[in-house]
Image (tube, rainbow, N blue to C red):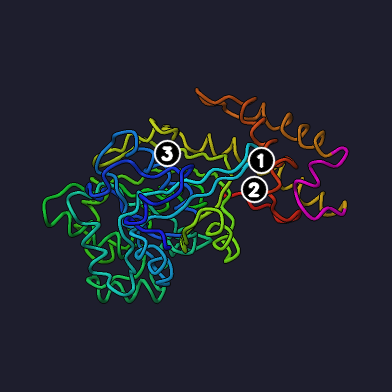
Amino acid sequence: MRLSAAALASLPPGIDKPGYDRNQPVGVVHLGLGAFHRAHQAVCFDALMAAGACGWMICGASLRSPRVAEQLNPQDGLYTCRVRDAEGERRQIIGAIREVLVGPDDPASLVAVMAHPDTALVTLTVTEKGYLLDPQSGTLMLDAPEIRADLAAPDQPRSVPGLLVAALGARRAAGLPAFTTLSCDNIPDNGRRTRQAVLAFAAALAPDLAAWIEAEAAFPSSMVDRIVPATTEADIDALEVVAGYRDAAMVKTEGFTQWVVEDWFSDRRPPLETVGVEMTDDVAAWERIKLRLLNGSHSALAYLGALAGHDLVHQAMAAPGFDGLVNAIRDEAEPTLDIRAGFDAAAYRAALVRRCSPLNRSSAVISRAGSASSRP
C-alpha cells in the first residue's frame, strides 16, 4: 500500500498523522523542495497548522528534476518524517505540502501560485548557486545564461531571481502586497543577498518595478540547523516492513532542530514562534553562536578524529581525550559570543554533545570523520 490521503485511516497506531484540514489555503510557496525542507521548514508549518493556525499549506516547486513531484504528488503531498536519536525512533506523517510543481515544465503556473492573493511567504532552499551571485563581488551575474534568458523572456522565467521578480511584478500589477521572501540556505546574510539578486534583476528588467520591490518587499535572513541524510531504497523498504505502507518521499533526521528567522515580513506573518522558531532582529548573532560552538568544534573533532584513525564522528567523540578537546574549544569560544536573550548556552552545549554521542550512532549525526556535515 502506498501512502496517500485515502490510506491514512488504515495506517497502524503509533504513527502521528495530520489532524488538521489539509484543504485550507496555500500560504507558502517553497522553491527547491528537497529532503532538508521536508525535514525542517515543512515540519514547522505542519506543527503550526496542527496547533490551529490556518492558511499555511505549502506548494512546493522543484527547479530541476521532476523526481520529487513524482514521489509526492501520487501520495497527495504526504510523507513520513522519521526522527531517530538516543531516545529512540519516532515516525510522523507530515501533511503540510499540498502539491509539487516542476518549475521548468510550467514556469507560468509557478509564477501564478506565487502571485496568488493567498500566498504570503516564499521560502527557498536552492543552494548557494541558485542565487546566481558572483562569488567574489556578491553581485548578480547578469551575463549568466539563465539570467540573460529570463531577461529576454520574463514571462517564462527559469532562474530564482527571474521567478521571484515575475511573481512580485504580477502582484504589483494586481494591487496585491509583496510576499515575503525567506531564504533558508546556508549563506551568511542570506536575506540581504537574496534581496540584492532580486533588485539587480528587476532593475535590469524594469526600474520602476525594482523601486516598488525595494520599498515594499521583505527579505528576512534566517539560520537553520538540522542534519538530514539522504534517504536510500533500503530506508524505504525498511519503513514498509515495519509500518505496512510504502513511502517514496520519506525523510530521516535527528531529534535536534533549530530555525532562527529575522522578524521582517511584508505580508501576513506566520506565528512561527509558537512552534519553537526563534524570531529575532539579529540572525547574525545566532549564526556566530552556531559557527563557534558547533561548527568549529565539530570540524576539529572530525579532522583530528580522522588523523587518530576513527571513521565516524561518534567514534572520535567516545575516544579518550576528545570530549575534553571539544569542551576546551567551546569554553574558549563562548566568551566571544553576544549571547542573545532566551539562549541557554549550557543547554545548547549539552544538545551538541548528544548529537555527537555514541548513543546517537543510528541517527543522522554519524557523519564521516574529516567531513563535518551539519547543515548550518
Upstream in the sequence, badge 2 or badge 1?
1
Amino acid type indicated by mark 2: Ser
Are circles 2 and 1 on residues that touch, CB within 8 Å?
A: yes
Nearer the camera: disc 3 or disc 2: 2
> Which residue is pictured at 50% across the width and 44% down the height?
224
Where residue 363 is drawn, which disc sits there? 2
- State which quarter of the image contains the N terminus: bottom left
Q: Which residue is mark 1?
A: 355
Circle 1: element type: helix
Label 3 – label 2 distance at C-alpha: 26 Å
Q: Position of residue 325 (x, y in %)?
A: 81, 37
Are circles 3 and 2 on residues that touch, CB within 8 Å?
A: no
Q: Position of residue 320 (x, y in %)?
A: 88, 39
Magenta segment range? 309-321
**Position of 158 compared to 287: left or right?**
left
Nearer the camera: disc 2 or disc 1: 2
Q: Position of residue 244 (x, y in %)?
A: 49, 57
Instruction: Rate crowding at label 2 as few (under 14), some (14 to 19) or many (20 or more) other CA atoms within 10 Å.
Output: many
Is residue 275 among the parts visible in the rendering?
yes
Amino acid type indicated by mark 1: Arg
Is residue 198 among the parts visible in the rendering?
no
Residue 256 lies, with reference to residue 342, above or below; the image says below
Give yes or no for residue 89 being in the magenta stretch.
Answer: no
Instruction: Rate crowding at label 1 as few (under 14), some (14 to 19) or many (20 or more) other CA atoms within 10 Å.
Output: many
Q: Which residue is mark 3?
A: 261
Q: Dividing the picture into quarters, in which one does residue 358 lie?
A: top right
